[in-house]
């Protein structure tokens, strides 16, 4: 489902990713670990098709990104639920409108009734049910982060890419988020989650990838972190 071959990424002459190669099968769950500046966010942006590698190739869903048509890239993006580290909500939209936007921008002008029900269920599970009609600019940082997760999950993605999604959460909210990610994974969704939270990695044992100095190492079995 995901294949990276000798991927490098440079910014202003500095190599952030160096010959990164790995494959991930459909339905797997992968933790992405590494210190600040290790290249985690860069790698996730590449996988989310927000940036292109300086060299090497990336394939998603069987398509090589640098040769895929615009229509294919659009279809790939609609199959990805991406939670960036910097939350990107529209400040003058309500919580519900921000989440619905991930579905309506997929070519639907009106929100289907089934999608409306799903969004409300996700918001309830994330403790945001009573805030669905509040404007995004009135939310706390943790609440905004949970809205970003709800937005990613609402479109029923085949691949979830989450960059430090629990970074601004208390313990209860952290495990509410993890519960949703794990349930999605059990249903067959592939999950890549970057985290600094060692407790999550210890308690929910999954395959791990460690980025250090632009290089990646994979732990085929559950890692100790």
Image (tube, grey):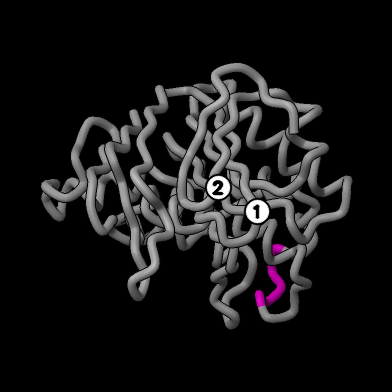
Reading the image, the residue beneath label 2 is 212
Residue 133 magenta-highlighted: yes
On screen, residue 156 versus residue 65, left or right, reads right
Q: In the image shown, does 160 or 93 lie closer to the viewer?
A: 160
What residue is shown at x 68% (from left), y 25% (from top)? 223
Could you tell me which secondary element the residue under label 1 belongs to?
loop
On screen, residue 43 versus residue 56, left or right, reads right
Mark 1 surroundings: few (<14), some (14-19) or many (≥20) residues within 10 A = few
Tell me, for residue 35, which label it has, or none: 1
Alpha carbon of mark 1 to alpha carbon of mark 2: how far? 7 Å
User: What is the chief secondary structure element of the magenta stretch?
Assistant: loop
Residues at marks 1 and 2 touching, judged by CB atoms closer than 8 Å: yes
Q: In the image shown, does 132 or 44 lie closer to the viewer?
A: 44
Residue 165: x percent and y percent? 66, 52
For the record, the magenta segment spans 132-136
Of callouts 1 and 2, which one flags the residue occurring earlier in the amino acid sequence? 1
What residue is shown at x 35% (from left), y 75% (from top)? 12
């Amino acid at each position: 489902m995901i294949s990276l071959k000798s991927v490098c990424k440079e910014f202003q002459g500095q190599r952030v990713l160096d010959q990164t190669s790995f494959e991930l099968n459909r339905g797997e769950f992968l933790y992405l670990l590494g210190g600040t500046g290790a290249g985690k966010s860069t790698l996730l942006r590449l996988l989310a098709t927000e940036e292109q590698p300086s060299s090497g190739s990336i394939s998603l869903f069987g398509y090589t990104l640098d040769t895929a048509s615009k229509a294919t890239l659009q279809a790939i993006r609609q199959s990805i639920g991406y939670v960036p580290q910097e939350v990107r909500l529209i400040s003058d939209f309500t919580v519900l409108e921000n989440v619905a936007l991930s579905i309506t921008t997929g070519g639907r002008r009106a929100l289907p009734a089934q999608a409306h029900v799903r969004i409300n269920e996700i918001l309830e599970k994330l403790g945001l049910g009573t805030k669905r009609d509040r404007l995004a600019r009135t939310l706390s940082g943790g609440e905004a982060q949970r809205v970003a997760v709800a937005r990613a999950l609402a479109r029923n993605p085949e691949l979830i890419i989450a960059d430090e999604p629990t970074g601004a959460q208390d313990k209860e909210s952290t495990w509410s988020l993890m519960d949703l990610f794990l349930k999605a994974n059990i249903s067959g969704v592939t999950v890549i989650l970057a985290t600094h939270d060692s407790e999550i990695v210890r308690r929910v044992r999954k395959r791990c990838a460690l980025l250090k100095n632009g290089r990646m190492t994979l732990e085929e079995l559950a890692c100790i972190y």
